Amino acid sequence: MLSRVQSAMIRRAAGVRAASSAAAAAAAKP
């Protein structure tokens, strides 16, 4: 079972990845 801290860290990591990928996609657009 994942602890609340572990689940929170996973959510945070996923959010950071999504934000960075979205920013990269927006920056790649002219």
Image (cartoon, rainbow, N blue to C red):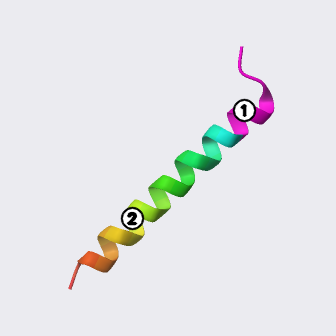
Q: Amino acid at mark 1?
A: Gln
Instruction: Describe residue 25's horizontal placement relative to residue 10 as left or right.
Output: left
Is residue 5 inside the magenta stretch?
yes
Task: Give the side of residue 13 with respect to residue 27, left or right.
Answer: right
Crowd around label 1: few <14 · some 14–19 · many ≥20 (10 Å): few
The residue at the point 39 percent across, 64 percent down is 22
Q: Residue furthest top?
A: 1
Using the rendered view, name the quadrant where residue 9 is placed: top right
Q: Is residue 29 above or below residue 8?
A: below
SS class of the residue under badge 1? helix
Q: Residue at x 71, y 40 (%)?
A: 8
Query: What numbered label is drawn on residue 22?
Result: 2
Main secondary structure type of the part rendered in magenta: helix
Q: Quadrant of the C terminus?
A: bottom left
Residue 21 image position (x, y, % from top left): 39, 61
Q: Horizontal and vertical percent for residue 11?
A: 62, 42
Give above or below for 6 relative to 21. above
SS category of the residue bearing label 2? helix
Q: Which residues are magenta?
A: 1-8
* Quadrant housing residue 29: bottom left
Please give the name of the residue rendered at 79% of the width and 35% of the height, measured from the top-left corner: 5
Cα separation, mark 1 vs mark 2, equals 24 Å
| Residue 4 image position (x, y, % from top left) | 79, 30
Q: Quadrant of residue 24?
A: bottom left
* Location of the N terminus (image quadrant): top right
**Compared to 11, does 28 lie above or below?**
below
Residue 28 highlighted magenta (yes or no): no
Q: Which residue is mark 1?
A: 6
